[in-house]
Amino acid sequence: MKKHLLGFAAAVGLSIGLAGAAQADMLSDIKERGKIVAATEMHYAPFDILKDGEYQGICHDLFTEVAKELGVEVEFLDLPWQSILPGLEAGKFDFVNAPVTITAERMKRYNFTLPIGNATVALAKKAGDDSIAKPEDIAGKAVGSQKGSAQLEQLKAFSESLPTPADVREYVNIDEALADLAAGRIQAVANSAPLMGYAAVQRAGLFEMVMPPFGDPKFFGWVAPGGEDSATLIAEINKIIIKMHEDGRLQAINEKWLGSNPDLPTTMPVVN
């Protein structure tokens, strides 16, 4: 009788464990409910833009295609950048469709998709400012970047390598940094090359890019919670990203917003 009870308890435990594993599979859960909730900060043009109350941009267009391929609806949340990754860890939403720089430190905590954008750092300056012709010319000057971003950390490291470190200033979002640049309160803004290039094109005559970009090549990816629960979701989204490489949708969306198609790897890059 005791053996039977132990066998029954083991069977119950196994069934509970299997049920828990099934419930913990994010892809299955999302498909069952028919919706994925994705968070971003809609103030990071051209990836994320909020214009007249409408969300648009590269990440909007790409992730809308992903949701169609998954066969689910997508609900987009607009949150301050500093709250997005903590919110993901707290389970407040399913996914981060913001362009998040892929770093070795972040890969220890989160599961990344394949790259969806170029995150290499570049500078924008005020048009006509001849005192900045190359990145090294920011020595001793006031330069802004976004608080909590990988680009800010790369700017700080680059600044420390200069004969006179730059006066690095942190902003809640890049729109605020660009506003200070336009007003002459700072002399440059550092962020991803696509973002700085987009600002220079959209506000021609006000901003110019400082070439070349500096630092190691970096890429943006999207993010799911770390651990096995999101492994199938990431794998499925990676298949869709590769499909969009092959059928031209990724190129068309990038050309729509950037006027060019960045060379993005279809395997996970090695990061430091």
Image (cartoon, rainbow, N blue to C red):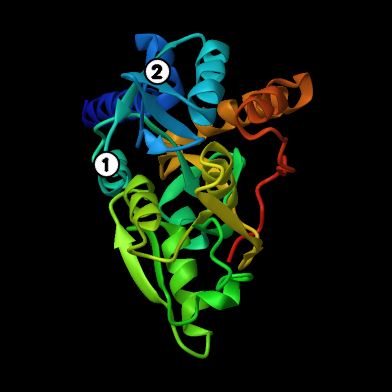
Query: With respect to residue 119, does 213 lie above or below?
Result: below
Q: Can you tell which quarter of the image residue 171 is in? A: bottom left
Q: Can you tell which quarter of the image residue 87 is in? A: top left
**Which residue sits at x=39%, y=9%?**
34
**Label 1 packing within 10 angstroms: few (<14), some (14-19), many (20+):** some
Position of 159 compared to 263: left or right? left
Helix, strand, or loop for circle 1?
A: loop
> Percent from the top left, x then y, of residue 17?
33, 30
Position of 131 compared to 263: left or right? left
**Label 2 packing within 10 angstroms: few (<14), some (14-19), many (20+):** some
**Which residue sits at x=31%, y=45%?**
81
Residue flagged by tag 1: what amino acid is it?
Answer: Pro
As measured in the structure, the alpha-carbon distance from the residue carrying label 2 to the one carrying label 1 is 24 Å
Residue flagged by tag 2: what amino acid is it?
Answer: Ile
Tell me which label, 2 or 1, sits earlier in the chain: 2
Query: With respect to residue 28, does 187 lie above or below?
Result: below
> Percent from the top left, x then y, of residue 259?
69, 32
Q: Residue furthest bottom?
A: 163
User: Which quarter of the rendering shows the N terminus?
Assistant: top left
Query: With respect to residue 92, does 115 lie above or below?
Result: below
**Which residue sits at x=43%, y=76%?**
141
Position of 94 compared to 265: left or right? left
Whether residue 123 can be seen here: yes
The residue labelled by disc 2 is 30
Nearest the viewer among 54 and 233 is 54
**Which residue sits at x=65%, y=59%?**
217
The residue labelled by disc 1 is 80
User: Which quarter of the rendering shows the C terminus?
Assistant: bottom right
> Percent from the top left, x then y, of residue 239?
65, 27
> Percent from the top left, x then y, of residue 58?
54, 29
Query: With respect to residue 250, does 91 lie above or below?
Result: below
